[in-house]
Image (cartoon, coloured by chain):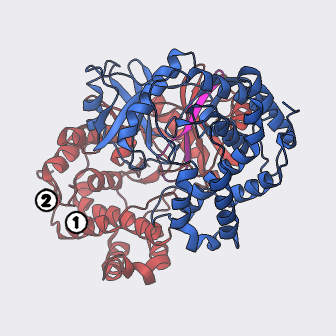
Chain colours: A blue, B red
Amino acid sequence: MAVYTDVAAEDLGSFLAGYDIGELLSYKGIAEGVENSNFLVHTGSGNFILTLYERRVAERDLPFFLALMEHLASRGITCPQPVKNRAGKVLGKLAGKPAAIVTFLDGLWIRRPTAAHCAALGEALARLHLAGADFPMRRDNALSVAGWRSLYDGCRERAHKVERNIESLVAAELDALERDWPRGLPQGVIHADLFPDNVFFLGDKLSGLIDFYFACTDTLMYDVAICLNAWCFETDHSYNVTKGRALLASYAKTRPPSEKEWDKLPLLSRGAALRFLLTRLVDWLDVPPGALVRPKDPREYARKLRFHQKVKSVRDYGVSAP
Amino acid sequence: MAVYTDVAAEDLGSFLAGYDIGELLSYKGIAEGVENSNFLVHTGSGNFILTLYERRVAERDLPFFLALMEHLASRGITCPQPVKNRAGKVLGKLAGKPAAIVTFLDGLWIRRPTAAHCAALGEALARLHLAGADFPMRRDNALSVAGWRSLYDGCRERAHKVERNIESLVAAELDALERDWPRGLPQGVIHADLFPDNVFFLGDKLSGLIDFYFACTDTLMYDVAICLNAWCFETDHSYNVTKGRALLASYAKTRPPSEKEWDKLPLLSRGAALRFLLTRLVDWLDVPPGALVRPKDPREYARKLRFHQKVKSVRDYGVSAP
């Protein structure tokens, strides 16, 4: 939950005067998202989301994120749409921060996803990958294998405070993944953070995807591995094969992975687990005094990593041989 | 900012099935309020606020607060309206907490109030006092003079961590106020927390009052003193006589205080300053590890208290002799 920057009504009023979205009627800071400050804004023409981009999001990346949302929407993906101001721009400045207005999406995120939700997610992820195929911009994934060692170096000495021996788990895994990380698999736009809180449902139907601020150009199957980690484990961190099968089968129906992609899923899943283990470790150890964000438990991803290390083939995830 | 309790979409959906307000379309935790968890809920019939009452609000007081909002609205005060469920009740249970749905009010709260805003506030406060005159329920003010010493006892030994000598300021003031606190002034329903973030404006017009969860039965002029403290000091904590005059003159036009009420305003203002100084001291010293609330600075109210101690008569606040 996060509102890092307070916005005065007086300043927001002036900011919105540059847009054609009617008079400001109300706005509330939203306790969602951990990277940016978000406000739900009600104007004469409806509901919008105002995002102030905080320091963890690089300003040079904002055009990529905003253009991607426009591109995906034009290809039929339901996601927030950046609103242009009267000068035709989607990016402005408010309270000293880069700021954008996007359209508001109805929908609820599911705290306890069922296999049916996982199936819907699988299809949406595949459609996202297909829709991104002709997106012309490129952004490297700073949180893929090349970025992990420096994260680890920053928290190695204090990692034992989180869990005994967690540093040896990470060190060995890092060596293995740096050596074996798959190259040459199909790449494209990936969401890279498609956790349940970024996927909206209305009734049983998936109604939209949000939060594209980790999106980048990377291995498509790595995005699947992130979702497998985020959606298909129970609260006791055990793998649920019914949910995994639902997600993967549904994804494959819309974008059938090659045999080589399937083969590498266990390795990619270890990488995805390590990525969230590392960023959570850093966040856990670096909570500043007075922080308004409660960091997530890194140990959840240590357990998931250990599960993936034991996976022999994609069959263990519940998928029949490709 | 606060959302203490997470609410699952699945659970909120079932809860709302007991109401006639349409299908749940979205909800977001709001980063506002420090006592309760608040969600902005969008349904087929519009926007609502869902409040989960956390432990700092006594469950036995909830009927008072909710009935008061209904009463005030029936007397023409714009404030949130509790929504009845199909069983005719305004109070239910969600995520293990008492919960209510109230109507959503458009409007913005002003970060930097001008004298015109203070004048509008003064009139609204007087109208609130008049509208509350025939409200039949009663709730004692636990945060008035009788409650201050126990607050002080709980933080006295650590108070010097906040400011050197603050404990002697408080101790002397407490003795004086317990001795001299005015009795017998006109009483009635007071809001008791009418800070700028609880007062909405649309354009120049005051459009509504919110957050009645400190409301109680107490000296009306004490409510004026709370507002004087909350609205009429600058960010450097100096008193702004133009704003004070605007607030008080405007209040007096709608509900003219007696000479005795005016006479006691300086003493009541010292009490109001001490009340917020004490609760802020407690909050400041008792922030639990992992808290998601940033406590407000108690020293602001120590400065205000010292100002009021030097006030000779209500003339120093900018009011001509009553």
Q: Position of residue A287 (x, y in %)?
A: 50, 63
Mark 2: which amino acid? Answer: Asp
Q: Is residue B89 above or below residue B184?
A: above
Task: Residue at 50%, 15% (x, y): give it.
Answer: A74
Sequence order check, earlier mark of 2 and 1: 1
Q: CA distance from mark 2 to mark 1?
A: 9 Å
Q: Is residue B228 above or below residue A31?
A: below
Residues B322 and B216: in front is B216
The quarter of the displayed image where residue A87 is located: top left
Mark 1: which amino acid? Answer: His
Question: Is residue A17 in view?
Answer: yes
The quarter of the displayed image where residue A244 is located: top right
Is residue B29 found inside the magenta-colored segment of the image? yes
Quadrant in which the C terminus of chain A appears: top right
Residue stretch in magenta: B21-41
Residues B41 and B196: in front is B41
Residue indicated by mark 2: B316
Question: What chain letter is assigned to the residue under label 1?
Answer: B
Residue indicated by mark 1: B308
Task: Residue at 38%, 74% (x, y): give it.
Answer: B178
Q: Position of residue B220 (x, y in %)?
A: 36, 51
Task: Residue at 46%, 22% (x, y): give it.
Answer: A70
Is residue B43 found inside the magenta-colored segment of the image? no
